[in-house]
Amino acid sequence: MDEVFKALADPSRRQLLDVLNERNGQTLRELCAGLDMARQSVSKHLAVLEAAGLVTTTWRGREKLHHLDAAPINGIAERWMTRYDRHRAGALADLKRALESAPMNEFAYTTYISTTPEKLWQALTDPAFTRQYWGVSFETDWKKGSPMVWAESGAKTSDPDQVVLESDPFHRLSYTWHTFTQEWAKGAGVDDETLAKLRGEKRSKVSFTIEPHGEKVKLTVLHDGFDDESTTRSMCSEGWPALLSSLKTLLETGAPLT
């Protein structure tokens, strides 16, 4: 947490987070174009933010995209902002603004796990693992373009648009999000009004990038393709941190979070 406060102490870095909060997934060139900072300075600030876990990166072809990772900010909020009166937390004004700003159209999260790329890939694809930390199993051969059947809460969900988008074992996995059916909603305890909102939104997708990082493995999750003011994004962004924490605990201790 010290690294997070140190990163947030610099106004230029807070400005960078504000820019990413307004439009996530920008390249270094795009960020430099919207800021009165030299390219080298922007690059250095991004490195500090990434080291603190406040920014995570993905690749789109040859372009490196930068995403705001809200998990460390939410951690600060849970530990400090709920303990004290927010109206008196003037020193955290920029953080408060970031927390209360309009939702973005994607969710990015990075975690480091003491495991191997092979084990992590297995945990993302093997039903014996996914049922333990997610409560979900996938019926698919994990080949690009293959259909996926989601089994969750006693219901199976299938649809022609539920497909594997990318599959590079031990490196990268991407697929479209499941269809919101009446059977799924019943099993998940979702009311009819919320289901109607979910079914009215376009289908999103999730991507997992696996990278060796010393004795650990860096896992970056990018869930994007949401509508503005998306109900789907709101629900997923609340669920992903807990789910990935359970995945990490399972791989490192042999048991998921309970």
Image: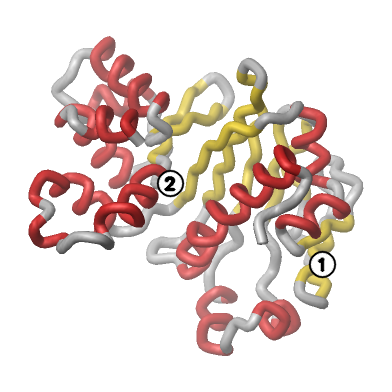
- The vertical placement of 202 against 164, above or below, is below
Q: Which quadrant of the figure has residue 180?
A: bottom right
Residue 152: image x %, image y %?
77, 69
Q: Which residue is mark 2?
A: 71
Most extreme residue toward the top, as rendered? Answer: 40
Q: Is 219 on the left-hand or right-hand side of 144?
A: left
Crowding around mark 2 (Cα neighbors within 10 Å: few <14, some 14 to 19, many 20+) is some
Q: Which residue is mark 1?
A: 151
Q: Is 168 on the left-hand or right-hand side of 92?
A: right
Q: Is 234 on the left-hand or right-hand side of 159?
A: left
Q: Residue at x 75, y 59 (%)?
A: 162
* Quadrant housing the N terminus: top left
Considering depth in this image, is 115 or 49 the residue closer to the camera? 115
Q: Amino acid at mark 1?
A: Ala
Q: Which quadrant of the figure has residue 143?
A: top right
Considering depth in this image, is 118 or 87 the residue closer to the camera? 87
- The vertical placement of 255 against 39, above or below, is below
* Quadrant housing the C terminus: bottom right
Residue 93: image x %, image y %?
13, 49
Q: Residue at x 91, y 47 (%)?
A: 141
Crowding around mark 1 (Cα neighbors within 10 Å: few <14, some 14 to 19, many 20+) is some
Considering depth in this image, is 79 or 40 the residue closer to the camera? 79
Q: How is the image coloured?
A: secondary structure
Q: Which quadrant of the figure has residue 19?
A: top left
Considering depth in this image, is 138 or 197 the residue closer to the camera? 138
**Marks 1 and 2 in Cβ contact (< 8 Å):** no
Q: Is 256 on the left-hand or right-hand side of 146?
A: left
Residue 205: image x %, image y %?
62, 52
Q: Amino acid at mark 2?
A: Ala
Instruction: Please tell me whether mark 2 sits on a helix, a strand or a loop.
Output: helix
Residue 170: image x %, image y %?
77, 29
Q: Residue at x 70, y 85 (%)?
A: 186
